[in-house]
Image (cartoon, helix red, strand yellow):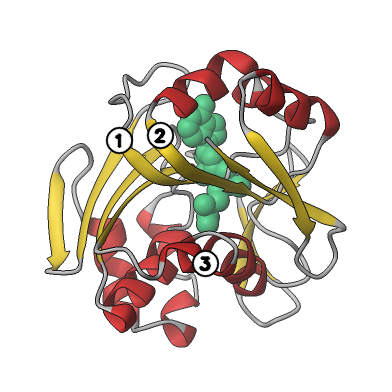
Amino acid sequence: MTEGKDIRIIETEDGSHSLELPNLNETYHSKYGAIQESEYVYIKQGFSQFVKTNGLKILEIGFGTGLNALLTLREALKRKVAVEYHTVEAYPILPEVYEKLNYGKYILSAEAFLNLHQISWDEQKEVSPYFKIKKYHQKVEEIDLPHNYFDLVYFDAFAPSKQADIWSVKVLEKVGNSMATGGKFVTYCAQGAFKRNLKTLGFKVEELQGPPGKMQMIRAVK
Ligand SMILES: C[S@@+](CC[C@H](N)C(=O)[O-])C[C@H]1O[C@@H](n2cnc3c(N)ncnc32)[C@H](O)[C@@H]1O
């Protein structure tokens, strides 16, 4: 899907880059601000909820540009919280694309950002005593996940209108089973069928105000 040439770098309203897939008519982030959206949805409404914990195991669906991973690395270092970050990506972007992304200008450094991309797939790597990462080059539909393990899930797939299967009960059940009781699941998406799927699976679903440009986002608790 993203390994071909049909991917474009765009500048969003906060100055940070995102990627656009013209064939799918889809972007990786909000056009109102990629960093602004990711910081609000995944860090403010997700990571920051666990600020008092000793360590945090995070699962991300959709590594994509690596922006959520970079933001989380920054938080882990700042708050001195040991993070184990697991991220699943079916279609990694190529060096010629990630080398041009400007996230390192705003968050930590260009070196820190490039390092996250250059880490091998499917091997756990310690980036710092506060941040271990394992990137899985796999489809979420096909991956085996541990049970009762993750404290926090960043669910950052393309919209249900583009990739309905990923938001299905089947995938959400697998992701839910991988979460510890009391674990939190955050996503930018607040689509009705998806919310009903979460409720069917027994999640407590909170509708929160969305980032700029979006009415709502979802945080669900297992
Ligand atoms: C909204 S974008 C990624 C956002 C990413 N977190 C970021 O900050 O750039 C969705 C990502 O999901 C990936 N993806 C698409 N289908 C997938 C699948 N079946 N399994 C895992 N990842 C998938 C896409 O390649 C893309 O990188």
Which residue is identified by label 3? 43
Q: Amino acid at mark 3?
A: Ile
**Where's residue 67, x and y in %?**
47, 64
Label 1 vs label 2: CA separation?
5 Å
**Where's residue 160, x and y in %?**
74, 31
Which residue is identified by label 1? 149
Lateral position of residue 2 relative to residue 50, left or right: right
> For the N terminus, which image quadrant?
top right
Q: Is residue 54 above or below residue 108?
A: above
SS label for mark 3: helix
Which residue is identified by label 2? 179
Lateral position of residue 115 relative to residue 36, left or right: left
Lateral position of residue 120 relative to residue 28, left or right: left
Label 3 vs label 2: CA separation?
18 Å
**Where's residue 131, x and y in %?**
22, 64
Lateral position of residue 125 relative to residue 151, left or right: left
Identify the residue at horizontal 31%, vertical 72% (top origin).
76
Label 2 near label 1: C-beta < 8 Å? yes
Q: Amino acid at mark 2?
A: Met
Q: Is residue 75 above or below residue 220?
A: below
**Mark 1 residue crowding within 10 angstroms, few (<14) / some (14–19) / many (20+):** some
